[in-house]
């Protein structure tokens, strides 16, 4: 299926970034029908949270904000797809332009601000899905909301019966005050409320609840999050969101735009954070590693640092959907090279270099 889209990449990249993204989503809606890709190598399969993943390569949140094309994306060979971020009420997001290509760095900067059509439309689309495969939902708060916890509870109540997993996004740099929710005392209260809402919505075999954190955390903040994760019994971590840092190695003219940076410059710090949180939690909390993956070696580095699953997005902008099969092929070869019969055998075996 990727062969239909990869030749169009040079044309799509002539469009402004957000226009190109919208055009891609529209094109995919015509192919958002169930399509089962070829089986993956047995070494890539894993079972986590009582769910069977055909491979550990997922699509990160941000691409399909409104759950319009999850089945089309699964058809490209992803092991799972994360939709959202969705907020209870529709919101336009920040003023345009707000998405920037850093071509020389194969990176992106975005300050989109949770632009989405709201929870009702999102829920209706998930309810109409005809395909199979693991689809998660990333939930957030409205920018002007005075009660952040109520917004997240609304997301859990609406989507727990439909999503295969839920991600609590408290780490986007583009919603004022959002990252303050990563402090321990706030997390303890928030996660307790969300677990209660989830139990009411789905009493039996509820979807796992994950927390997405920022890469720009101080030592004290990392310690607090690790403690909160263990005390609340949350099901997993997504590490990490985009970064507000601007490495001196960036070459693109738009490198100083405000917003979150993603792509290869995020690979090293996000992978280091995977290792750190894996260590702090004693390997007891499954981790989804995201940030800067553009090949099988990058995915493998995150897995060896402690991630059971990984996600990518920015590299698709530059390499197209053919990237997915290449990452899986390279990852399977690396597992075989090191004598690992499964992804699970490689998790947490080596710190990032």
Image (spheres, rainbow, N blue to C red):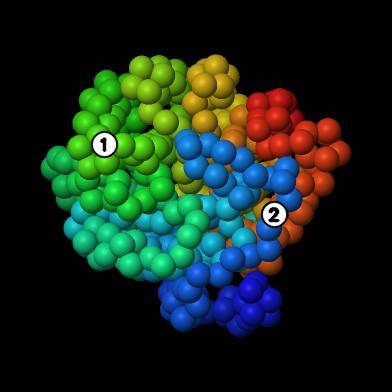
Quadrant housing the N terminus: bottom right
Q: Position of residue 316 (x, y in %)?
A: 60, 63
Look at the numbered disc 1 and give the secondary structure of its residue: loop
Residue 40 is tagged as: 2
Q: Nearer the viewer, residue 260 or 303?
A: 303
223, above or below 134, in the image:
above
Local packing at callout 1 (Cα closer than 10 Å; few below 14, some 14-19, many 20+) is few
Tag 2 and tag 1, C-beta contact below 8 Å = no
Which residue is the site of mark 1? 203
260, above or below 9, in the image:
above
Q: Residue at x 44, y 21 (%)?
A: 226
Q: Position of residue 157 (x, y in %)?
A: 22, 45
Q: Residue at x 68, y 76 (%)?
A: 3
Quadrant housing the C terminus: top right
Q: Residue at x 52, y 21 (%)?
A: 284
Look at the numbered disc 2 and give the secondary structure of its residue: loop
Q: Position of residue 249 (x, y in %)?
A: 66, 47
Residue 39 vs residue 160: left or right? right
| Residue 132 visible in the snapshot | yes
Mark 2 vs 1, N-terminal side? 2
Q: Position of residue 251 (x, y in %)?
A: 65, 55
Q: Nearer the viewer, residue 276 or 42?
A: 42
């Amino acid at each position: 299926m990727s062969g239909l889209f990869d030749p169009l990449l040079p044309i799509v990249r002539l469009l402004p970034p957000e226009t190109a993204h919208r055009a891609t989503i529209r094109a995919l809606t015509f192919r958002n029908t169930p399509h089962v890709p070829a089986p993956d190598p047995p070494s890539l399969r894993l079972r986590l949270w009582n769910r069977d993943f055909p491979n550990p390569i997922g699509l990160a949140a941000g691409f399909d904000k409104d759950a319009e094309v999850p089945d089309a994306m699964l058809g490209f060979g992803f092991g799972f797809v994360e939709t959202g971020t969705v907020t209870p009420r529709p919101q336009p997001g920040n003023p345009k332009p707000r998405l920037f290509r850093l071509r020389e760095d194969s990176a992106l900067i975005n300050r989109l601000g949770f632009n989405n059509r709201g929870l009702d439309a999102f829920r209706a689309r998930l309810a109409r899905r005809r395909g199979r495969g693991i689809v998660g939902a990333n939930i957030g708060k409205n920018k002007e909301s005075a009660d952040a916890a109520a917004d997240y509870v609304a997301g859990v109540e609406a989507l727990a019966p439909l999503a295969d997993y839920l991600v609590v996004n408290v780490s986007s740099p583009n919603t004022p005050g959002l990252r303050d929710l990563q402090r321990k005392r706030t997390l303890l209260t928030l996660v307790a409320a969300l677990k209660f809402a989830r139990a009411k919505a789905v009493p039996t075999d509820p979807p796992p609840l994950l927390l997405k954190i920022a890469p720009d955390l101080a030592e004290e903040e990392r310690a607090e999050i690790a403690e909160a994760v263990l005390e609340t019994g949350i099901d997993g971590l997504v590490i990490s969101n985009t970064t507000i840092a601007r490495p001196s190695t960036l070459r693109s003219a738009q490198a100083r735009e405000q917003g979150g940076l993603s792509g290869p410059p995020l690979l090293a710090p996000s992978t280091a954070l995977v290792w750190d949180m894996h260590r702090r939690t004693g390997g007891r909390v499954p981790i989804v590693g995201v940030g800067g993956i553009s090949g099988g070696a990058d995915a493998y580095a995150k897995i060896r640092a402690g991630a059971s699953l990984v996600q990518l997005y920015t590299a698709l902008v530059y390499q197209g959907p053919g990237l997915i099969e290449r990452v899986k092929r390279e990852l399977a070869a690396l597992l075989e090279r090191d004598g690992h019969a499964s992804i699970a055998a490689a998790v947490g075996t080596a710190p990032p270099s």
